[in-house]
Image: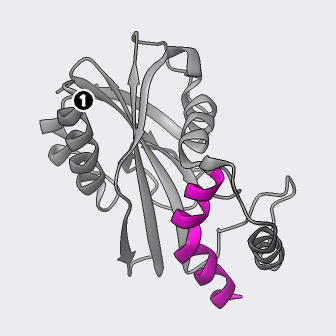
């Protein structure tokens, strides 16, 4: 099982890239579906990473003007309870990373795609968190909003704040949050939004 998680984990970036183009050779699709069918599933059919030693996740940096949305994780989540993070979720189905980012955004905050003016994926990074015996493959995504929305939190978070980039270092945040921030800030710089 761990080997199957590892193969999915290592190939997710490639898979997501192919999914984005809509071109997936039939032979590769069959192999991927066979591989994915060996993984534990949640009742709704998504891949269950709750006990996996490796997991791919999307981290969604929601930006409006010069502020970022950060969320404090609730006591009802599996990891990093009470820590600050951005919108995030397991990449638990084969869909483009940007599509998953929008789904997580809507689920965790109530922000709809209509409020998004710009979405761009930054470079992926990996790290191991020995405290929970898991390796993360993080896909940071920058979401620029066209207006400041009302926020409706789901069970995963207990509070939220809008902060400047310089305030991230003051947060009691999840591991390596600053690494994702640096990558999306580079996207902002390229787009002239910084």
Residue 13 part of the magenta segment: yes
Say how many tags the image has.
1
Q: In which quarter of the image is the C terminus?
A: top left
Of residue 29 and residue 110, the one placed in the foreground of this image is 29
Q: Is residue 79 above or below residue 44?
A: below
Of residue 104 and residue 33, the one placed in the foreground of this image is 33
Residue at screen point 81% across, 61% down: 42
Residue lying at the far top in this picture: please name it: 147
Number of residues whose C-alpha sits closer than 10 Å to that of mark 1, classed few (under 14), some (14–19) or many (20 or more): few
Residue lying at the far left in this picture: please name it: 166
Q: Is residue 179 rendered to the left or right of residue 51?
A: left
Element carrying mark 1: helix
Residue 105 x/y as whole percent:
55, 33
The quarter of the displayed image where residue 175 is located: bottom left
Q: In this view, does 29 lie above or below 83?
A: below
Q: Name the residue under label 1.
A: 191
The quarter of the displayed image where residue 154 is located: top right
Residue at screen point 61% across, 48% down: 21
Q: In this view, does 151 lie above or below 60?
A: above
Type of secondary structure dominating the magenta stretch? helix
Q: Is residue 69 above or below residue 41?
A: above
Span highlighted in magenta in the image: 1-19
Residue 185 part of the magenta segment: no
Residue 65 x/y as whole percent:
25, 17
The quarter of the displayed image where residue 35 is located: bottom right
The image's colour scheme reads one colour
Residue at screen point 18% across, 25% down: 192
Residue 110 x/y as whole percent:
59, 23
Residue 171 x/y as whole percent:
23, 45
Q: Quadrant of the N terminus?
A: bottom right
Q: Is residue 1 rendered to the left or right of residue 108?
A: right
Q: Is residue 10 rendered to the left or right of residue 1?
A: left
């Amino acid at each position: 099982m761990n080997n199957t998680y590892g193969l999915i984990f290592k190939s997710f970036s490639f898979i997501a890239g192919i999914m984005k183009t809509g071109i997936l050779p039939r032979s590769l699709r069959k192999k991927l579906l066979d591989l994915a069918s060996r993984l534990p599933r949640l009742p709704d059919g998504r891949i269950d990473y709750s006990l996996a030693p490796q997991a791919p996740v999307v981290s969604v940096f929601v930006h409006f003007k010069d502020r970022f949305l950060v969320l404090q994780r609730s006591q009802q989540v599996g990891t990093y309870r009470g820590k600050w993070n951005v919108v995030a979720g397991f990449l638990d189905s084969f869909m483009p990373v940007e599509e998953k980012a929008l789904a997580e955004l809507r689920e965790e905050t109530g922000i709809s795609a209509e409020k998004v003016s710009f979405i761009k994926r930054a470079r992926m990074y990996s790290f191991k968190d020995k405290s929970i015996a898991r390796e993360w493959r993080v896909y940071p995504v920058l979401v620029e909003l066209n207006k400041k929305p009302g926020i409706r939190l789901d069970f995963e978070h207990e509070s939220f704040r809008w902060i400047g980039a310089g305030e991230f270092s003051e947060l009691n945040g999840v591991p390596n949050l600053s690494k994702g921030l640096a990558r999306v800030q580079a996207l902002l710089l390229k787009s002239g939004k910084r």
